[in-house]
Amino acid sequence: MDDLMTYPNSTRHRIMLDDLKRSLDPFGELPTTDDDGNDGGETVDPDTGEIE
């Protein structure tokens, strides 16, 4: 991480975004609760956090 601080700002930004994208890749195929028809149409209760 210390070496990263010596890079130009635009390079650091690109590296950080690439790392973030790589870290989220394993979650890309998980079902969502957005009622898109692919996941059974679950909704989340905003008060309790319970999936309905």
Image (cartoon, rainbow, N blue to C red):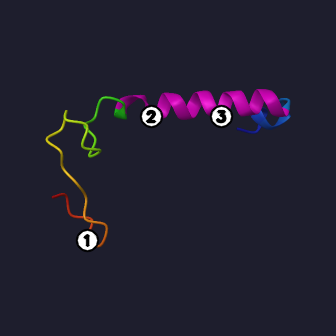
Q: Quadrant of residue 32?
A: top left
> Nearer the viewer's eye, disc 1 or disc 3?
1
Q: Give neighbour class at mark 2: few <14, some 14-19, many 20+ (Cα, 10 Å).
A: few
Position of 8 with respect to 11 (left or right) is right
Q: Name the residue under label 1.
A: 48
Residue 10 in the image: x percent, y percent?
80, 29
Q: Quadrant of residue 15?
A: top right
Position of 16 with respect to 36 (left or right) is right
Q: Which amino acid does label 3 sit on?
A: Met
Residue 41 in the image: x percent, y percent?
18, 45
The alpha-carbon separation of the residues under discs 1 and 3 comes to 34 Å
The disc at residue 24 is: 2
The alpha-carbon separation of the residues under discs 2 and 3 comes to 12 Å
Q: Mark 3 points at which residue?
A: 16
Q: Which amino acid does label 2 sit on?
A: Leu
Q: In which quarter of the image is the N terminus?
A: top right
* Residue at screen point 76% across, 39% down: 2
Per the picture, the main secondary structure of the magenta-coloured stretch is: helix
Give the magenta range.
Answer: 9-26
Q: What element carries label 2?
A: helix
Q: Give neighbour class at mark 3: few <14, some 14-19, many 20+ (Cα, 10 Å).
A: few
Q: Which amino acid does label 1 sit on?
A: Thr
The alpha-carbon separation of the residues under discs 1 and 2 comes to 26 Å
